[in-house]
Structures are given as C-alpha cells and as structure tokens.
Image (spheres, helix red, strand yellow):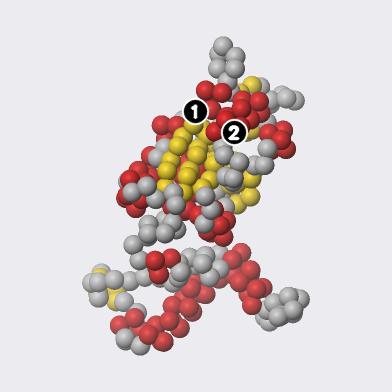
Amino acid sequence: MTFAAKILTLYPEMFPGPLGISLAGRALAEGKWSCDAVQIRDFATDKHRSVDDTPAGGGAGMVMRADVLAAAIDAAVPENMPLLAMTPRGKPLTQDRVRALAAGPGVAILCGRFEGIDERLFEARAIEPVSIGDYVLSGGELGALVLLDACVRLLPGVMGAPSSGDEESFESGLLEYPHYTRPAEWEGRTIPEVLRSGDHAKIAAWRKSQAEIDTRSRRPDLWERHVGARVQSPSGARQKKEE
Ligand code: ADE
C-alpha cells in the first residue's frame, strides 16, 4: 500500500525537496509513498488570484482566506485522509501521532503562510492544527517536510534495520542512550568500558541508566511524564510519587 502525501501550499516547488533524496527519496522512487503538492492559488476566484486579505480587527500582515482554502481542500483531499494544518498555534507533533499517521492511508497537510489562517476554516472542516515546535517559521512547508520525513521512515521496508526504530528516542518515553564507534581512542577519549565487555545484560542496563540520566537533565518534561507513568497503580489511580 502506498502512503499518500497531499500538500496544499503556495510553494509546491518545495516538495518533495529534501525528501527526494536518501532514504525517503529511494522509498518515493520505489512507490512506497507518493507526494502530490497542490497549488492553493489555483483555487482563487478573483482576477488577481488572491489567497489572502487584511486581518479583521486590524493589525500587521495578511490572513489566508477560508473560502479559497476550503475550495482547495474540497477538490484535492480525499474523505478518508486525515487533514492537518501546519501552524505554530497547533498541538505539538509527537512520535505517537507520527506512528498513527504512518499506519494509515496517508496525510493531507495544509501549509499556512502570512499571519495565519481564517479561524472559520478550522470550524467548517475537520482540520487538526499541528506545530513542530515552539518557534515561528516563515511558513508551514518546512513543518510539513519534517512531519513527512518522520512518517516515511516508519513505512514498511523503508528503514534499513527495523529494530533500530524500537529503541530510539521517544519510543519508550525517554531519549535514546548515547552511541560510540571506532576508533577505540580518539583525542584521548575512550569508549565506555562496559560497551567493550561483550556482556549484553550489563550493556542493556548501562544504556537504560544513561538514557535516564540524559532524559532527566535535558528533558525534565519527558522525565516527569516517565516517572509519573511508573507510579501509576494498576487501577490507573495516581499514587504518591517517591522523592
Ligand atoms: N508555521 C510557522 N511556524 C510553525 C511551527 N512552529 N510549526 C508548524 N508550522 C509552522
């Protein structure tokens, strides 16, 4: 089954862009996924082909018009396809959401530009607003590429060694453990002895503890959730956390 990506954008030439090379590019050439970028401007109806207008209530910049975007959606997005809109006002993208999308028929992504999208569009169509992080990009296209990259690498037969997906960051709610490779000594620094011991149980325990140490210091938000999940009783009621 082909994972279908449908992107609604003012810059279709940005797709597949970097996803046309390497792992995703090979998968695209092999038909494991498809990438169809639709020009939103083709659905404008006035003689200037305008897709935006000034914000109601005043203020800086321009707002994308609901009528033009709805026409693009209704013409280009199949009923069964989840429809996401890239916006810094969206819910943060997670590996869980990526995994669910990758398991489905594909995804349609509306790329916002200018100051934003007329809010009535979100009320009138089933659109999930998604953000890729707490910073502002000049448009949703790079966010769409990020989301597609994360989905495509999970498609069956795309990732070289499937097992490398199971242990990686976020799959267990923790950051992944650190990696090392040859040379055994570099600039006076050696590889942790345990990794050269051949003792697989000891190596697994060391990796788990490193993942915990790094998550705790770099991502206290993930660590809190991880610890919270561990003190959840079987009935689901929260118990008092240990210090
Ligand atoms: N468009 C502009 N900023 C964005 C962000 N952080 N995530 C998704 N789309 C965006």
Ligand 1 is within 8 Å of the C-beta of the residue at disc 1: no
Mark drawn on residue 39: 1
User: For the residue labelled by badge 1, is the local secondary structure a helix, a strand or a loop?
Assistant: strand
- Residue mark closest to the camera, 2 vs 1: 2
Q: In this view, does 227 lie above or below 169?
A: below
Mark 2 / mark 1, whichever is N-terminal: 1
Confirm or deny contact between disc 2 and disc 1 (CB under 8 A).
Answer: no
Residue for point 46% across, 76% down = 210
The answer to whether one can see residue 52 in this image is: yes
Mark drawn on residue 73: 2
Mark drawn on residue 229: none
* Residue 229: image location, x then y, percent: 65, 73
Please tell me which residue lies in front, 128 or 227.
128
The answer to whether one can see residue 69 in this image is: no
Quarter of the C terminus within the rendering: bottom right
* Residue 8: image location, x then y, percent: 53, 34
Residue for point 43% across, 56% down = 155
Residue for point 57% across, 45% down = 81
Near mark 1 (Cα within 10 A), the count class, few <14, some 14-19 or many ≥20, is: some
Q: Quadrant of residue 195?
A: bottom left
Q: Distance between the residues labelled 2 and 1?
A: 11 Å
Q: In this view, does 56 lie above or below 207?
A: above
Near mark 2 (Cα within 10 A), the count class, few <14, some 14-19 or many ≥20, is: many
> What's the amino acid at mark 2?
Ile
* Residue 223: image location, x then y, percent: 59, 70
In the image, taking residue 106 as reference, residue 163 lies left or right, namely left
Please tell me which residue lies in front, 179 or 123.
123
Residue for point 41% across, 87% down = 201
User: For the residue labelled by badge 2, is the local secondary structure a helix, a strand or a loop?
Assistant: helix
Q: In this view, does 19 lie above or below 175?
A: above
> What's the amino acid at mark 1?
Gln
